[in-house]
Amino acid sequence: MIRLEQVSKTFHLKSREVEALKQINLTIEDGSIFGIIGSSGAGKSTLVRCLNLLERPTEGKVFLDDIELTALSNGRLRKERRKIGMVFQQFNLLAQRNALKNVCYPLEIAGVPGNQAKERAIELLKLVGLEDRMYNFPAQLSGGQKQRVAIARALATEPKYLLCDEATSALDPNTTNSILELLKEINERLGVTIIVITHEMKVVEKICTQVAVLNEGEVIEQGSVQEVFLSPKTKIAQEMIYPKPKYDNRNFHGKVFRLAFGGQSSSEPIVANLVLKCQTPVNILGAGTEDIGGKAYGQMLLEFPKDEAAIAEAKKYLDSIGVHYEEEDADGI
Amino acid sequence: MEFNQLVALLWKGSLETLYMVLTSTLCSYVAGIPLGVLLFITDKNGICRCRPVNLVLGVIVNLTRSIPFIILLIAILPFTRAVAGTTIGTNATIVPLVVAAIPFIARMVESSLKEVDQGVIEAAQAMGSSPLQIIVKVLLPEARPSLLVGCTIAFATLLGYSAMAGFTGGGGLGAIAINYGYYRYQANIMWATVFVLVVIVQVFQELGMFIVNKTDKRIRN
């Protein structure tokens, strides 16, 4: 378990002070995949660096399994850091070492004998699917392959935790997916608790179980992904999670509803059923839904004619199948 | 002077020069690398931030670097005598060469280390590396290509300095150029010496770059 207690971080720049984190309280349970989402400048990277104390909080305490990291000497802290692997956006591999030697590095510095380290490194490269690229140097690998090496390297000392700082942000969508699959597999097979820092909704949607929304250095919402994504309480979280599709309200005369799908069976033809049940034509203004493991996630904007009876009927139907909905403001956009 | 006499003279001079320059390059690196590393790690973004140490070292390095070599050469003659037992000849020349090269090399080492990606250092820290492990296993190996380039520059610079030492009785090609070319107006011998110096610089420069290109793993080949 990683626990942050009233963690604040202030950077003193020449001209001004920047409060990057403001009294953050956060508990990351073992076994979870914990997402920290926020737009750029929200303090995500600072937050993740406070977890392994690459950045020392100005105030507050950081606990790792009841050991207070913020109270440790540098030497002890280095030992504790081996329990926390870290993966970066820019991979940060040693350019002058091949893949195998990169994975060996954390074992070398932990004092593991050469042969043993090599064996373990090969095992890990197999896990990430790169056993045939062991002797390649980072310059000879693609972005996705580099990140796989970085993941193998982060796992070398058998850490309980894996921090991913925008680990997929430099990768194309397909590669992103394959890296996310890999992280999920690592979580399930090795029981490693993963903390994912990202600005991308999709990443959280795809693999996280828990999520915290960070805005201007504050955790504004926190909970299970289902909870937070289906009914974000704060306006900022809503906008971040469901960026509103743009539409010009003047052209529509009916009522606009925003539907949030949160795990209904994706094989159910909800819109078609809605039309049939209510006997009213609906207009799809915008939709962004995704099938995740046979369940529908995402949102849809529907326009209903101004017919109170039909709308009441529609609401009843949506309630009955458990789709969350919201009436949009008249000004729309 | 007959041709084969000239060749013999230049050959002896070249060997002396190479001996002086290679030995002094080696000796200056032995001290220059630790000093450069120290400058880098104590800097404000370094892994062992220590402003006083950085400031003091920086001032010493800059002071020594700003003294013209020919002045330094004469100024430290007592020190040279104390170390080498004499102030003339090749061995005596090595002393001022090393003194002049150490701060210069320290700065070059520092700038090579600055080229190492900050993210890689951060990753090493996240993995629980000690400062010494970061220096030995990350900084120096990652900066190797740049350090080698710096080494070829240091070599060429010391070659130039060693020629200046010819004025105070240092041996080698510089002494030949000064004694024959300058004092005896034998311009042809001076030009022959210069030619040999150019060849030596060229050979070492190319050799250095060849090794850099062969060993830099950032280059796909």
Image: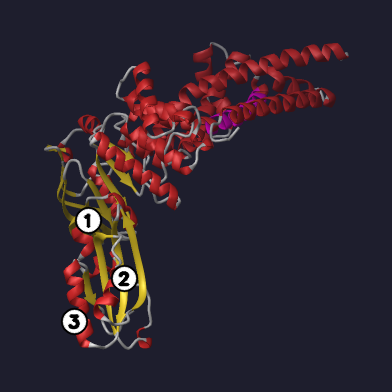
Q: Is residue B161 magenta?
A: yes
The chain holding disc 2 is A
Residue at the far right: name it.
B2
Can residue A97 be seen? no
Q: Does the magenta stretch include residue A319?
A: no
Which circle marks residue A225 in the picture? 1
Does A214 sit above or below residue A181? below
At mark 1, the secondary structure is helix
Q: What residue sits 29% from the left and 82% below the top?
A: A280
Separation of residues labelled 1 and 3 (CA atoms)? 30 Å
Q: Work out whether disc 2 and disc 3 sit on a shared chain.
A: yes
The chain holding disc 3 is A
Does A284 sit above or below residue A198? below
Q: Work out whether disc 1 and disc 3 sit on a shared chain.
A: yes
The chain holding disc 1 is A
Q: Looking at the image, tell me whether mark 1 or mark 3 is earlier in sequence order.
A: 1
Using a 10 Å C-alpha cutoff, classify the residue at mark 2 as few (fewer than 14 neighbours), some (14 to 19) or many (20 or more). Answer: many
Does A6 sit above or below residue B195? below
Residue ID for mark 3 = A312
- Please state which amino acid type lies under the numbered disc 2: Met
Query: Is A294 positioned to the left or the right of A320 in the image?
Result: right
Q: Nearer the viewer, residue B46 or A303?
A: A303
Q: Which of A210 and A313 is in front in this view?
A: A313
- Please state which amino acid type lies under the numbered disc 1: Val
Q: Which numbered disc, 1 or 3, marks the residue closer to the eye?
A: 3
At mark 3, the secondary structure is helix
Which residues are the magenta region?
A: B146-165
Residue ID for mark 2 = A300
Whether pointer 1 and pointer 3 mark residues with C-beta atoms closer than 8 Å, the reply is no
Separation of residues labelled 2 and 3 (CA atoms)? 18 Å
Quadrant of the snapshot with the C terminus of chain A: bottom left
Whether pointer 2 and pointer 3 mark residues with C-beta atoms closer than 8 Å, the reply is no
